[in-house]
Image (cartoon, helix red, strand yellow):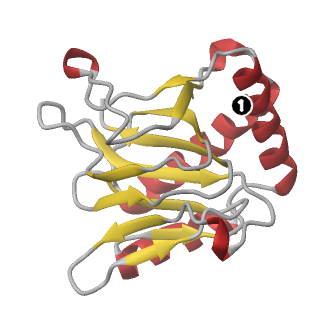
Amino acid sequence: MDASFETLITSFIENNVGIADDFLSDDLCQHLKQNMLTLNESHQMKAAGVGNDSKMIYDNTIRNDKIYWLDRKHNNEFENAFFDKMDAFVAHLNQSCFTNIKSYEFHYSLYEVGSFYKPHFDQFEDDAKRQFSMISYLNPNWKPTDGGELKIYQTNNNQTIAPTQGKTVFFKSQDLEHEVLVTNERRFSVTGWLKRG
């Protein structure tokens, strides 16, 4: 069992926000980031919307990142390595915490300089399948002046988390309002949700 799995789960149990600084290896982060750069150069990264399929809106005053959905059918070895890691984590989570996660979905997320995502919850009002949010960061040598932190709002315990390479953040999708603060450098991540159904 990967030690970072227990780090993520234990910190989640203690603080409602799980954080593992070395969930993804530097090598995998570098390859995933290069995938994103290639996709962006070929105009395959698309403007992100707000809401689910039936109620999708595009409003760059709420969020202005670009995304690309990951899929094993792409047969990309590094995306599949990421999925392998998620499969192992979900199996451990289900076994140790009885969460009954059945599936997941993940996308690349690219925030250009000046981009942000205003405060929001990750679970849709008319669809409760999303149980846990997971964000993995691909940003080497990130500095405090680069901005782009994930800010999570909790009663008397707001957290501001730097998007440093290899770090993964894990929390309940329906419980915690959060935002991405304005970034002063290009910011790369893989963002997704563990789902029941």
Q: Quadrant of residue 70?
A: top right
Q: What residue sits 32% from the left and 42% below the top?
A: 62
Q: What residue sits 27% from the left and 24% below the top?
A: 57
Q: 75 or 5: which is nearer to us?
A: 75
Give percent across and percent down for residue 117: 40, 48
Give percent across and percent down for residue 144: 65, 75
Q: 148 or 164: which is nearer to us?
A: 148
Q: Amino acid at mark 1?
A: Glu
The quadrant of the image that shows the C terminus is: top left
Q: Is residue 12 left or right of residue 109?
A: left
Q: Using a 10 Å C-alpha cutoff, classify the residue at mark 1 as few (fewer than 14 neighbours), some (14 to 19) or many (20 or more).
A: many
Outermost residue to the left: 126
Q: Give the total of numbered labels.
A: 1
The quadrant of the image that shows the N terminus is: bottom right
The residue pinned by badge 1 equals 79
Outermost residue to the right: 27
Q: 116 or 96: which is nearer to us?
A: 116
* Vertical relation: 149 (above or below) 180: below
Q: Is residue 180 left or right of residue 67?
A: left
* Vertical relation: 138 (above or below) 160: above
Q: What residue sits 54% from the left and 29% below the top?
A: 67
User: Tag 1, which secondary structure?
Assistant: helix
* Vertical relation: 84 (above or below) 170: above
Outermost residue to the bottom: 156
* Vertical relation: 176 (above or below) 195: below
Q: 80 or 3: which is nearer to us?
A: 80
Give percent across and percent down for residue 85: 66, 45
Give percent across and percent down for residue 22: 72, 66
Q: What residue sits 68% from the left and 60% below the top?
A: 23
